[in-house]
Amino acid sequence: MKIFKRVLLALLVVLIVIQFVQPAKNISKARSPHDIAFLYHEPSNVRSILDKACNDCHSNNTRYPWYNNIQPVAWWLNDHVEEGKRELNFNEFGAYRLSKQYHKLEEVVDKVKKSEMPLSSYTIIHTDAKLTDVEIASLTEWANSIMAQMKTKYPADSLVRKKQPGQDAR
């Protein structure tokens, strides 16, 4: 019983200490010049969809819930945000190569249509982020319209991802 109390006390001390180690927050005051909204028309309905369902993980501005101040939850959320931004960052979209921009828009259409985005782990807490059929249609039409604009504006080979050595065809 004595060892159990020591382990419990040690665990409590560790939990208290880790509360002082917080990851940096994903909050930017300035809007990036590479923002997708500066490159392509973003209708207000699409802007509101992106704000409620996408931008917490796919932009330079995350709206943090109260529980983000509790460790290890903050580390877990930070990992999701960093991974989301690595996959697609709407605020840095214009800095991507044209082929990557085009491919990311294809992924937006695919993942939204398949209900893979937003993640179910996100929509459990953020129930307003669940996309309706109308919102899915709006978002996919918007992404498809940008891809159509890109096809008319740029040479076709600039929109194709180059195969990397050792990469299987996808």
Image (cartoon, rainbow, N blue to C red):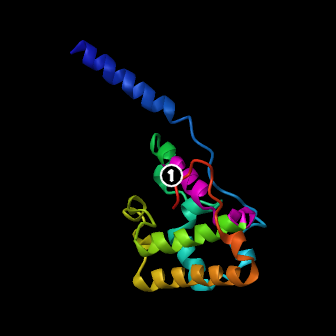
| Magenta stretch: includes residue 93 | yes
Residue 42 picture location, percent across and down: 65, 81
**Left or right, residue 154 beside residue 20:** right
Q: How many marks can you see?
A: 1
Which residue, as the protein is rendered here, is positioned at the far right? 33
- Which residue appears at 53% of the width and 77% of the height? 49
Q: Secondary structure at mark 1?
A: helix
Residue 81 vs residue 36, the one in the foreground: 36
Residue that badge 1 annotates: 80
Residue 135 vs residue 144, the one in the foreground: 144
Residue 135 picture location, percent across and down: 47, 82
Q: Which residues are magenta?
A: 77-97
Quadrant hosting residue 160? bottom right
Amino acid, disc 1: His
Q: On the rendered image, what quadrant is the N terminus found in?
A: top left
Determine whether 94 is above or below 167 in the image. Answer: below
Residue 123 picture location, percent across and down: 40, 65
Residue 42 vs residue 8, the one in the foreground: 42
Q: What kind of secondary structure does the magenta stretch mostly adopt?
A: helix
